[in-house]
Amino acid sequence: MLVIDLAIVVISATILLAVWRIRTSSIPADQVIAADLLTFSVVALIALIGVRSARIGTFDLIVIATLVAFLAAVSLSRAMTGGRR
């Protein structure tokens, strides 16, 4: 459990740094990248908490959250490029 607890602390620090980067950056591309990092860090935190608590239902939530985060990343990148491919 020590490794999982340490990973939870590291991912939590990553979440805090991503939020700080979103709030302090004036460049939209940096904010989009930090938002992407934030969403995947939250998914990782949910996964670690699910492993730590040994609940099976958490993994369904992880799959759905990963798909939503991926679609959000694609949408944000399309918005940044103005819809060009």
Image: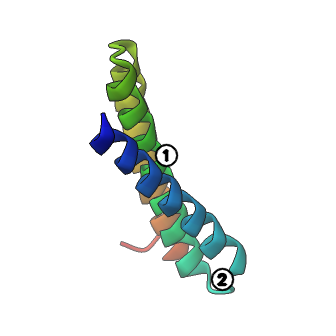
Q: Is residue 82 among what the camera can see?
A: no
Q: Residue at x 35, y 72 (%)?
A: 85
Residue lying at the far bottom in this picture: please name it: 27
Q: Which residue is drawn at 42% across and 31% down?
A: 49
Viewer-proximal residue, 5 or 79?
A: 5
Residue 60 x/y as whole percent: 36, 20
Q: Which of marks 2 and 1 is in front?
A: 1
Q: Which amino acid does label 1 sit on?
A: Val
Q: How crowded is mark 1: few (under 14 residues within 10 Å), some or many (20 or more)?
A: some
Q: In screen coordinates, is 1 left or right of 45?
A: left
Q: Residue at x 34, y 23 (%)?
A: 59
* Color scheme of the displayed model: rainbow
Q: What element carries label 2?
A: loop
Q: Distance between the residues labelled 2 and 1?
A: 20 Å
Q: In screen coordinates, is 2 left or right of 15?
A: left
Q: Which amino acid does label 2 sit on?
A: Ser
Residue 52 x/y as whole percent: 36, 27
Viewer-proximal residue, 41 or 54?
A: 54
Viewer-proximal residue, 34 or 17?
A: 17
Q: Indicate which disc, 2 or 1, sits on the residue closer to the N terminus.
A: 2
Residue 35 x/y as whole percent: 55, 62
Q: Is mark 1 on a helix, strand or loop?
A: helix
User: Quarter-wise, where is residue 21 in the image?
Assistant: bottom right
User: Quarter-wise, where is residue 31 in the image?
Assistant: bottom right
Residue lying at the far top in this picture: please name it: 56
On the image, numbered disc 2 is attached to which residue?
25
Q: Specify the label residue 4 is tagged with.
A: none
Residue 4 x/y as whole percent: 32, 40
Q: Is residue 47 among what the camera can see?
A: yes
